[in-house]
Image (spheres, helix red, strand yellow):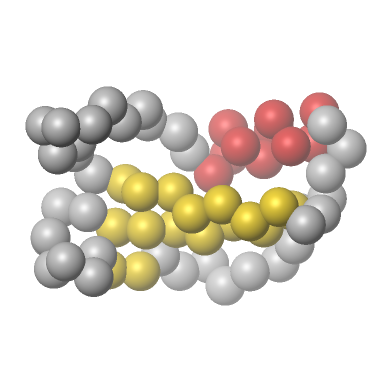
């Protein structure tokens, strides 16, 4: 099983971040014979209370 959490929002100035969407990862996973696992279609707020940052969890097997 493969689970990944995507961070959406601007970088923090110290690390490099790359934009990636759930759809892009789904396409990549299907090319490698991974099957999507149904997960709730909701993101989550940032635990550090940054309004511009949100999180999305995806699962494959």
The number of discs equals 0
Q: Is residue 16 left or right of residue 42?
A: left
Quarter residue 53 falls in: bottom left
Question: Which sits in the foreground, 50 or 23?
Answer: 50
Give x and y (percent) for residue 1. Answer: 78, 57
Residue appearing at x 15%, y 52% in the figure: 52
What residue occupies the far front of the structure in this picture? 14
Residue appearing at x 67%, y 40% in the figure: 26
Question: Which sits in the foreground, 17 or 15?
Answer: 15
Up/down of 7 relative to 49, above or below: above
Up/down of 38 relative to 24, above or below: below
What residue occupies the far right of the structure in this picture? 33
Q: Is residue 28 left or right of residue 45?
A: right
Residue appearing at x 56%, y 52% in the figure: 4
Give x and y (percent) for residue 6. Answer: 44, 49
Question: Quadrant location of the C terminus?
Answer: bottom right
Give x and y (percent) for residue 23. Answer: 58, 39
Residue appearing at x 48%, y 38% in the figure: 21
Q: Is residue 19 left or right of residue 47?
A: right
């Amino acid at each position: 099983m493969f689970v990944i959490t995507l961070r959406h929002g601007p970088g923090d100035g110290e690390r490099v971040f790359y934009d990636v969407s759930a759809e892009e990862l789904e396409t990549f996973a299907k090319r490698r014979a991974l099957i999507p696992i149904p997960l709730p279609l909701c993101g989550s707020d940032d635990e550090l209370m940054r309004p511009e940052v949100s999180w999305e969890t995806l699962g494959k097997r």
